Amino acid sequence: MTDLTLETAQTIVSVALKTARAKSFKPLSIVVYDARGALKALVSEDGTSLKRAEIAMGKAYGALAMGVGSRALHKMATDRPYFVAAASHVVGGQLVPVPGGVLIKNSQGQTLGAVGVSGDTSDNDEIAAAAGIEAAGLTFDAGA
């Protein structure tokens, strides 16, 4: 598989939401991009705050643009804040360097896209994203 299909993106979103509800997470926004950065899916649960979707988009798009999960971007932001600020500028501000932006990879390690989740703690956002990716039979890379 070299492309991320709409069906796969919908599976990722569905299972991420199911996981969040089973674990009593706060309401989430979830976004899925394919490898070229095209939007495949975007949902926001009832009760999310106004800009949660944009935060989820920044987590996923930043991970995709930089080629690492947003957990790694968080470490970069701590270790090299000027670099991350410059990178954020280069990608039009669409880089949110906190966990919850997860790369989607196939069994050969090729990046197929990224998932961004926002609404609960960053660690919980990442848990929901990872669950959706694994349910789709793919591998997640959170940047740990």
Image: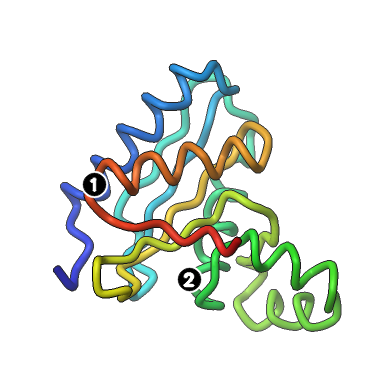
Residue plotted at (18% across, 73% down) = 2
* Residue beneath disc 2: 64
Q: Which of marks 2 and 1 is nearer the N terminus?
A: 2
Residue plotted at (30% across, 55% down) = 40
| Foreground tag (2 vs 1) | 1
Q: What element carries label 1?
A: loop
* Residue beneath disc 1: 136
Say few, some or many: other residues with alpha carbon within 10 Å of mark 1 (under 14 / 14 to 19 / 20 or more): some
* Left or right of residue 88: residue 57: left
Image quadrant holding the N terminus, namely: bottom left
Image quadrant holding the C terminus, namely: bottom right
| Residue 80, image x, y percentages | 83, 78
Residue plotted at (27% across, 55% down) = 138
Quarter of the image for residue 52 reads top right
Q: Is mark 2 on a helix, strand or loop?
A: helix
Q: Reply above or below: 119 against 89.
A: above
- What amino acid type should be assigned to the residue bearing mark 1? Ala
Q: Which of 71 and 60 is in front in this view?
A: 71
| Residue 134, image x, y percentages | 32, 46
- What amino acid type should be assigned to the residue bearing mark 2? Leu
Say few, some or many: other residues with alpha carbon within 10 Å of mark 2 (under 14 / 14 to 19 / 20 or more): many
The alpha-carbon separation of the residues under discs 2 and 1 comes to: 19 Å
Count of labels shown? 2
The disc at residue 69 is none
